């Protein structure tokens, strides 16, 4: 199996290296516009712990919205199911940064993976903390999950988004007006922009996501990150909401829980089988990695890892 997976991962990377149509790199965060669209990394870590890498699997990139999986996990640990009074669990069918549903739904975002929902989740992590401490807690948690203290926050990306994230400022203020933000929007957004600026390689990201493939257990430290029920529910949200208004198509084509980010990264989970991270900076029309999605489609087809059957 080890050799087979190395072949599968290697041949997907080799095939995609030749693809001309690579999507568009995000430019609305100026610092992300500098990333080379030819980059491609893929990392698979199986439930048994074997690691299979290809391409730029050890190059750090901006994980952006993939961070929302980790902050959701932390927030559920902190406030439990009370979180669901402030954020829903339904796919939005709208772009990640959309404001349209918020008015009709009185400031309660559809789910924790669109920007509005993730900002509320981050707001809960700020309770009782200064923003710096909350940022430190998030970074420490991600390092603990991946068992890797080299993971860092790219301050240039955080500054770049702070300077240009006007839509997120609007979302945060709008939710504050509905009473669904407990802190000054500038403070909550400060934490949110830093969590999005966490830089990780595919290898590190796949390592950090392993608890979701292992029923909530930490793969190396022993013990649990979350209960098996919570792992199952986070995976359900990743499947239904992890790709914004591309979530249905992703489930149709790939069929595993996954969370994308505008940096071009995707963390995918094949429960009981593997944790997978892919990175290709060019995005499709709904803001998900174009080649990343194709790579996962090919990987799942070759391995039979779709949760809906081989
Ligand atoms: N930091 C980005 C934003 O808030 C994250 C969006 C994403 O990755 N889809 O706009």
Image (spheres, helix red, strand yellow):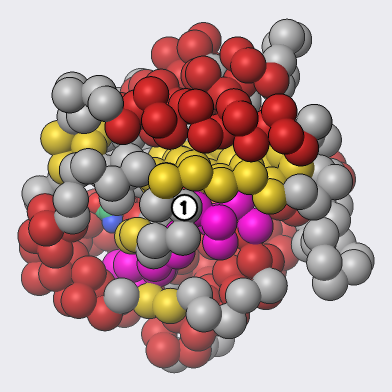
- Between 131 and 5, the residue placed more toward the observer is 5
- Look at 35% across and 27% down and name the residue there: 16
In the image, residue 15 lies in the stretch drawn in magenta: no
Residue 83 drawn above or below residue 41: below
Residue 200 drawn above or below residue 2: below
The spot of residue 141 in percent (x, y) is: 62, 73
In the image, residue 206 lies in the stretch drawn in magenta: yes
Residue 197 is left or right of residue 81, and the answer is left
Residue 245 drawn above or below residue 117: above
Asked whether the viewer can see residue 223, the reply is yes
**Local secondary structure at mark 1:** loop
The residue labelled by disc 1 is 57
- Between 111 and 180, the residue placed more toward the observer is 111
- Look at 42% across and 46% down and name the residue there: 55
- Look at 73% across and 9% down and name the residue there: 310
- Between 204 and 38, the residue placed more toward the observer is 38
- Which quadrant of the rendered structure holds the N terminus? top right
**How many dots with numbers?**
1
Task: Name the quadrant containing residue 195.
Answer: bottom left
The spot of residue 147 in percent (x, y) is: 68, 72
Q: Write the start and end of the magenta stretch as one range.
A: 192-207
- Look at 76% across and 48% down and name the residue there: 50
Label 1 environment density (alpha carbons within 10 Å; few <14, some 14–19, many ≥20): many
Asked whether the viewer can see residue 174, the reply is no
Residue 255 is left or right of residue 38, and the answer is right
The spot of residue 32 in percent (x, y) is: 17, 57
Secondary structure predominantly adopted by residues drawn in magenta: helix
Task: Name the quadrant containing residue 173.
Answer: bottom left
Residue 34 drawn above or below residue 295: below
The spot of residue 54 in percent (x, y) is: 49, 44
Residue 271 is left or right of residue 176, and the answer is right
């Amino acid at each position: 199996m080890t050799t087979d997976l190395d072949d599968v991962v290697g041949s997907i990377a080799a095939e995609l290296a030749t693809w001309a149509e690579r999507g568009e790199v995000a430019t609305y965060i100026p610092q992300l516009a500098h990333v080379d669209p030819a980059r491609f990394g893929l990392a698979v870590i199986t439930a048994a712990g074997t690691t299979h890498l290809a391409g730029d699997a050890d190059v750090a990139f901006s994980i952006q919205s993939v961070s929302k999986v980790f902050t959701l996990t932390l927030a559920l640990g902190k406030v439990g199911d009370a979180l669901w009074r402030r954020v829903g669990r339904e796919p939005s069918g709208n772009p990640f940064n959309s404001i349209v549903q918020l008015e009709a739904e009185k400031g309660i975002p559809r789910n924790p993976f669109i920007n509005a929902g993730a900002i509320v989740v981050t707001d809960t992590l700020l309770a009782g903390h200064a923003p710096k401490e909350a940022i430190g807690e998030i970074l420490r948690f991600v390092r603990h999950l991946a068992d890797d203290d080299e993971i860092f926050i790219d301050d240039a990306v955080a500054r770049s988004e702070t300077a240009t994230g006007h839509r997120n400022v609007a979302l945060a203020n709008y939710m504050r007006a509905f009473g669904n933000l407990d802190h000054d929007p500038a403070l909550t957004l400060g934490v949110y922009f830093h969590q999005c600026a966490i830089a990780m390689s595919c290898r590190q990201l796949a390592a950090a996501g392993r608890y979701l493939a292992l029923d909530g257990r930490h793969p190396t430290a022993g013990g649990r990150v979350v209960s098996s029920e919570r792992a199952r529910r986070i995976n359900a949200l990743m499947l239904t909401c992890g790709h914004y208004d591309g979530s249905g198509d992703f489930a149709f084509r790939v069929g595993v829980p996954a969370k994308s980010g505008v940096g071009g990264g995707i963390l995918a989970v094949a429960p009981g089988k593997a944790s997978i991270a892919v990175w290709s900076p060019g995005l499709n029309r709904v803001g998900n990695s174009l080649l990343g999605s194709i790579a996962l489609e090919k990987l799942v087809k070759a391995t039979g890892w779709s949760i809906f059957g081989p």
